[in-house]
Image (tube, rainbow, N blue to C red):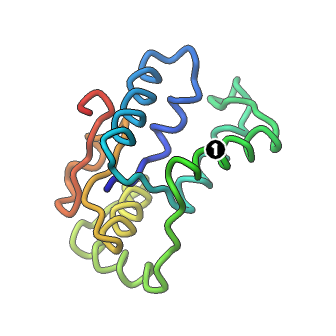
Amino acid sequence: MFLVDTSVWVRCLEKDNPLGVDCVRAIKKLKASGEELWTCAQVVIELWAVCSRPREANGLGFDAETIDKIVTDILLIAPHLDEPVDIGPRWRRFAVRYAPSGKPCHDLRLVTLADAYGIDRILTCNASDLKRFTEIKAVHPSEV
């Protein structure tokens, strides 16, 4: 099982990004091999933020209708995991262990969610950001 990070979905949408080819190929290969792919609220929210931001602000500049269609398509590939009711206390236990600061707090939230569901791999373009968390293996699309 894999939790698919926002970075992978964004690269899949960026037609001019060379990493996009690796991301699309990784998703297709994992699905064809029978792997379960998952997404979550945090990924959808982050994806919406990037997709709705103007291109000049490092976004994709899509309108809400287009983004909603993209999210619908993604959920057909990687269904949505509900947030466990104890996500807060779980995250806090990990935070005490790893002492994240800044952006890694959000990364740790993905790790916490994956751990709650017994998912031990996250497909991400930012594998180096997650390597400190021993509960999961961060897999770059080029490694698939």
Who is closer to the viewer here, 66 or 52?
66
| Relative to 55, 34 lies left or right | left
Residue found 30% across the figure and 63% down from its top: 119
Residue 15: x and y in percent read 58, 18
Residue 89: x and y in percent read 39, 84
| Res 63 quadrant in image | top right
| Relative to 31, 119 lies left or right | left
**Residue ID for mark 1:** 73
Residue found 49% across the figure and 67% down from its top: 81
106, above or below 29, in the image: below
Who is closer to the viewer here, 62 or 28?
28
11, above or below 73, in the image: above
Residue found 39% across the figure and 42% down from its top: 31
1, above or below 21, in the image: below
Q: Amino acid at mark 1?
A: Asp
Residue found 34% across the figure and 53% down from its top: 2
Quadrant of image for the N terminus: bottom left
Who is closer to the viewer here, 98 or 38?
38
Quadrant of image for the C terminus: top left
Residue 22: x and y in percent read 38, 24
| Relative to 97, 61 lies left or right | right
Residue 140: x and y in percent read 29, 35
Q: Number of numbered discs present?
A: 1
Q: For the residue labelled by badge 1, is the local secondary structure a helix, a strand or a loop?
A: helix
Who is closer to the viewer here, 37 or 127?
37
Circle 1 residues within 10 Å: few <14, some 14–19, many ≥20: few
